[in-house]
Image (spheres, grey):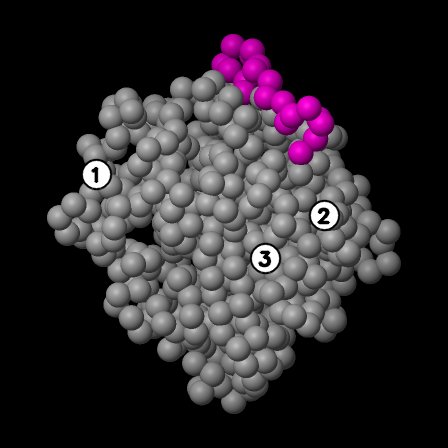
Amino acid sequence: MKPGNGALLALASETAAQNVVEFNLHRGIPDLKLGSMPPLSRRATYTQELANNITGGGYYAEVSIGEPPQIVTMVLDTGSSDAWVVSYKADLCTSARLQQQYGDSCGGTYDPRRSSTYSLVDRDGFYIQYLDGGVASGDYISDSFSIGGITIESLQIGYATQTVRGTGILGVGFSANEAALVQYPNIIDELTAEGLISVKAYSLYLNDRRSSSGTILFGGIDTEKFIGPLKIMPIIKALTANYTSFEVAFTGMGVTYTNGSTVAVATGTRGTLPAILDSGTTLSYLPDAMASKIIRELGAITDKVQTGLTFIDCEFLNTERDLTITFDFNNTAITVPVWEMVLDILGDYQSILPSTIPYERACLFGIQSTAGFEDSGAVKNSNFALLGDTFLRSAYVVYDLEHYQIGMAQANVNSTGTSVVELKAGDSGLPSLTGVSEKPVSPTPTSGGDGGGSIITGGGVATVTVTEKSSAPATVRMSGGGDMLALLAVTTMFALVGSTLVAL
């Protein structure tokens, strides 16, 4: 749904603290619209049903585009590199049939006719396909772009006139992974070129599952947001001429029980596995052998007939914090509480779950198998990991596009402190930094509602607070015979795969 009249960036005057500006980000909760469609096969689960119902999950930032400013909500996506917005005349926005088909509607669209700073760059030049099969296409344009109190005078973005998504995407990946035939400076390039940050790098802090907001810090690292030393690891270069995605070496994982025993899960015979760190993906995906072992260990069940999705007993929401899943990356390990992997989003649809799901109350599991991508034809080889928000919420991650490095540490969830270290031009790589010494005792997650935060700017650092959409079950109106379709729509709203389609 479109943001209300009050959903504007409320920028306050500069506070006593130098280079700090406080602002509010308002959360918009869209309506889910659902129409009748033919029964879906498991193959379609990873294409049509994962066709970008991004309005139910993911982390969003409000930006303003053009002059006078038009407020647009965009999904933050480290797995892609183009920023694009939905046109006011996009097919999805003007067709009730498409809105029914894709279970989505448009909100915060952009109209170039209303902007005095708009210019056309490449008519019909924008076309992007995501790993889940979703497509957005249209023109490449240029306009002023403001986020977090800073403005890029002229940023090239996609202008989607055909889309299955009602919300645009803010891709913050390598420019070599852009959809354009001719590479152009994307938002990270422009922030650096205009001197707003000194290094092409940013830090991502999503906070825990029950929190309503997180932060992205361009050009800096907040040592209050992670625990212990920030471990530095190289980005793996894919089989291309340039770096295109944030892949790191994933070396193994394990489930640790309350009694301290651990069940190891190997990545395979090679010992390492490429893992993509992707904020545009709500769930996390593992090769089938790894996913199956975790699923069996926790008593989760994959519905292979109707939905292709994996479910877990909602009782795991009430388990002790020391029931965890650990992800290993050579020199560091990130511990994820199992309850972070349990998504209670099925609402009143428990009664129509397949009979193979035996739980009194079922939840969607935050780990799924990459086999579905191979089944759908999206990739030929599913021997990779795609670590989305169900993993990233437990990690503090620094994405360094300049030195091709990733910094990673255990997230200090629900931190209220701030201590920002600016990344300096001329540094040979990410600095050796140490966060807080220990995790706060029994932190209380923030409740839902409007997120808030502050930005730091003027000294080469810009912080933008991004807000997670509500995870409350959507209200779905159905016609006869639509029960399982409704279940699919509710569950897959949280299963966006934001990564662009690449050869893996």
Q: Is residue 262 above or below residue 95?
A: above
Left or right, 22 with reference to 318: right
Q: Nearer the viewer, residue 170 or 454?
A: 170
Kindly identify which residue carries mark 2.
238
Q: Which residue is found at the position 54% from the left and 18% from the top?
A: 256
What span is in magenta? 255-273
What secondary structure predominates along the stretch shown in magenta? loop
How far across and how far down the image is residue 163, in percent? 42, 66
Q: What residue is disc 3 on?
A: 80
Locate residue 485, reporting x and y percent: 26, 46
The answer to whether the residue labelled 1 contacts the one labelled 2, judged by CB atoms less than 8 Å apart, is no
Is residue 25 positioned above or below 223 on the image?
below
Q: Nearer the viewer, residue 184 or 454?
A: 184
Mark 3, secondary structure of its residue: loop
Q: Dividing the picture into quarters, in which one does residue 154 lie?
A: bottom right
Secondary structure of residue under mark 1: helix
Mark 2 burial class by Cα count in 10 Å: few <14, some 14-19, many 20+? some
